Image (spheres, coloured by chain):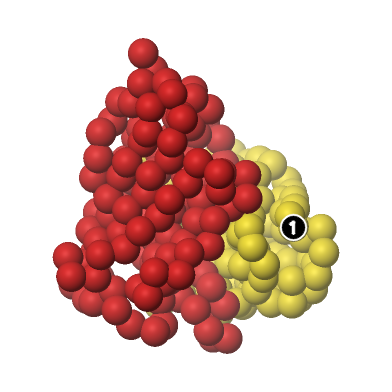
Amino acid sequence: DIQMTQSPSSVSASVGDRVTITCRASQGIASWLAWYQQRPGKAPKLLIYASSGLQSGVPSRFTGSGSGTDFTLTISSLQPEDFATYYCQQAYSFPYTFGQGTKLEIK
Amino acid sequence: QVQLQESGPGLVKPSEALSLTCTVSGGSMSTSSYYWGWIRQPPGKGLEWIGSIYYSGSTYYNPSLKSRLTISVDTSTNQFSLRVTSVTAADTAVYYCARRRSGTSYKNAFDIWGQGTMVTVSS
């Protein structure tokens, strides 16, 4: 199985800050990577597909990049609704696997 | 727009089978662009992909669950189902159904999710 490792596991930031979350795959996955946002008690929501594709309706302050084994999700200017947990997911090979999550908290 | 809704018992006894159904509304399941899948999340933990199915019936299972797992589809009712046998407390989780977009554009991302249903395994 391909292991997905996110860092940091948690981060504290303020409204207006720029935040970057990193996801590393245990082997190359080209650009077969997605990012999801999950608010408490809610289902995950797709933010980014194919490493850098912005899902329809998602604000442009969310940016994804990377290829191969190293990927990043950047939120350019944090808004109050962005405080949530973020997951990366590889869809390069079965079984699909998720990172352990990064909890973004208000400082 | 397409919506997914999970349904099924919220409490299952150990050693019995867990059965859930996902109803797809607002669009047909029988399109070549999508697969339909199940993902679960134990309380306070991360996400685990369980398996996926194509409208034709082709299935893809997580090897960690494969021996206990059946995913089926009924395109006449626009539903797909999950069955997990011989459950234990480790199967306690929120179970989500989701639509996976295939192809080189979306690269298999899960773009639409159900709200999730909590299943507790306990006697």
What tint does the image give chain A? yellow
Which chain is represented by red in the image? B
The percent coordinates of residue A39 (x first, y second) are 43, 46
Give the vertical position of A5 relative to B77 (above or below).
Answer: above
The percent coordinates of residue B49 (x first, y second) are 54, 52
Q: Residue at x 49, y 79 (%)?
A: B102
Q: Residue at x 43, y 36 (%)?
A: B85
Question: Could you say which is closer to the camera, residue B19 or residue A13?
Answer: B19
- The part of the image, by quadrant, that contains residue B5 is bottom left
- The part of the image, by quadrant, that contains residue A96 is bottom right
Residue occupied by mark 1: A2
Q: Is residue A27 left or right of residue B92?
A: right
Give the vertical position of A14 relative to B30 (above or below).
Answer: above
Pinpoint the chain carrying mark 1: A
Question: Could you say which is closer to the camera, residue B60 or residue A41?
Answer: B60
Q: Residue at x 43, y 65 (%)?
A: B53
